[in-house]
Image (spheres, rainbow, N blue to C red):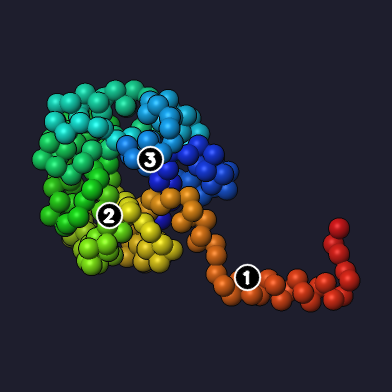
Amino acid sequence: MKFFVDSADIDAIAELNDLGMVDGVTTNPSLIMKSGRDILEVTKEICALVEGPVSAEVVSVDAEQMIAEGRKLAEIAPNITVKVPLTWDGLKACKVLSGEGKMVNVTLCFSVNQALLAAKAGATFISPFIGRLDDINLDGMELIADIREVYDNYGFETQILAASIRSANHVAESARIGADVITAPPGVIKALASHPLTDKGLAAFLADIEKTGQKIL
């Protein structure tokens, strides 16, 4: 499974990238606002840092404007993935941009039917939002499983990009179900290394070696 970092924080992306934990990056207008950077400038910097796909989101709701913005974003670097919302206009934009050979990430997916439409429109990635479904007492992981089943039934090549990841459990379940990609904030990705028994075992080992008075250096 591929790991995308959901962030526009250059330092946080670079730290994970140095460890080989970054297969791509996703951004959105909220993350750009949080970074305090110009959207074109920070996106270009991320693309230079990361070899994999970098999702940059359009900010219009009209299909023609989305297409124009998508073309502008795609000029930034070859690894740009144009991110469009799962609306009828977004699907129109996806069809045109994917037809031009551009990678397209269709975002804000909350149903299997929406995922079907995105695949039919030629989406490179579909982004179901797990956490936001959980917020309204629906099972986000069930949606990932349902999309996986439907895509496999018909051989769709659109990759399932599990988004709105809130916890390590979301990552593990996405991997078990067979999501192609997860995108998560840097803190969630780093938290995957944490386990209380690891901490407990390490503390015991360090206490025992201290009793011997031995050092390696």
- Residue mark closest to the camera, 1 vs 3: 3
Residue identifier under label 2: 129
- On residue 199, which mark appears? 1
Residue 150 image point, x, y percent? 18, 60
State the separation of the CA atoms marked 3 and 2: 16 Å
Left or right: residue 48 versus residue 68 is right
- In which quadrant of the rendered view does residue 57 lie? top left
Front residue of 42 and 152: 42
Residue located at (49% from left, 53% from top): 187
Which label's residue is closer to the chain start, 1 or 2? 2
Q: Secondary structure at mark 3?
A: helix
Above-or-below relation of 213 to 26? below
State the separation of the CA atoms marked 1 and 3: 32 Å
Left or right: residue 154 versus residue 101 is left
Q: Residues within 10 Å of mark 1 (few under 14, many from 20)?
A: few
Left or right: residue 1 versus residue 21 is left
Front residue of 127 and 37: 37
Amino acid on which the number 1 mark rests in the picture:
Asp
Residue located at (48% from left, 50% from top): 186
